[in-house]
Amino acid sequence: KHDLTQRLDISSRKRRFRHYLMDVGSSNAPQWFWYQRYHHIDVDGFSVNAISQYICQFYNHWRIGAAKPQEFSAFSDVIQEYQQFLDSAARQQAYDFWQTQAAHLPNVISLTTGSAANTSSSTITHTVPLIGGEWLTRYSPQLLPAELAMAMVFAYLHLHSGQEQVCVGVPFMRRISNAATCAAGAVVNVLPVALSLHPQMSIIDVAREMNKTIRQVRRHQMYDAEQIQRD
């Protein structure tokens, strides 16, 4: 908690990451937690997972002689790939797509209550028992539980706001080549995904419509979200 109150200043020369091993157990029954913290300018969620796996694999290589992990690609390879996109016909196609999409984006829905001064850095967790979870595959075995969870976000915002048009920022990997998938850095692109919903739609209907729209957006995921705003 103390560390989370400390800023990771990008203007200083101090390290913008933290790694701590904490033993919260007893001498007879140790229990270890691995705490990691990064500045988002350096890595995205995909990179955090890749770095964690690399460290674990390297530790096993050192301790028990397991296979040595594959080294990360240079981030310059990712930049070169992005430059190639900027110089390609795909960039113009993505520009045209996002010009059309942005012209029809709905008003932003806010769930904020109270002022920013009252916001908390803590997390509130709600647990919903699914009683076996058979309903997840009863109506559409082609849908993943994660897709239904995302659809519930759209459905909740629709019911909460009363708006037919609902837009949610969805993270896209933007890792298309081997260079990007083997590099650590901030590559993920959060793009607007807008759906038209009505109260008669089931959660399965929402998920199917969401997947259809995401497939369309994925073709143009290389286009920077901030560039959409500049355009």
Image (cartoon, helix red, strand yellow):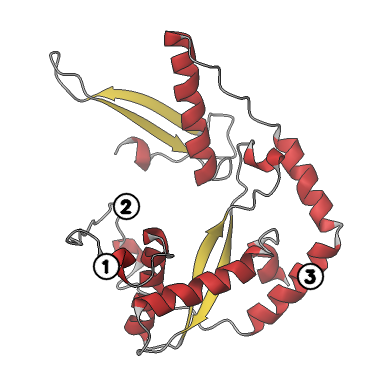
Q: Is mark 1 on a helix, strand or loop?
A: helix
Q: Return the mark for residue 135.
A: 1
Q: Are marks 1 and 3 in contact (CB under 8 Å)?
A: no
Which sits earlier in the primary sequence, circle 2 or circle 1? 2
Mark 3 and mark 2: Cα distance apart in space: 40 Å
Residue 186 shown left or right of residue 143 in the figure: right
Question: Percent position (x, y) of residue 117?
Answer: 33, 62
Q: In this view, does 52 lie above or below 161?
A: above
Residue at point 28%, 53% (across, down):
123
Which amino acid, mark 3?
Gln
Q: Is residue 187 visible?
A: yes
Q: Return the mark for residue 93.
A: 3
Q: Is residue 167 visible?
A: no
Q: Nearer the viewer, residue 66 or 85?
A: 66
Q: In which quarter of the image is the N terminus?
A: top left
Which sits earlier in the primary sequence, circle 3 or circle 2? 3
Question: Percent position (x, y) of residue 224?
Answer: 68, 60
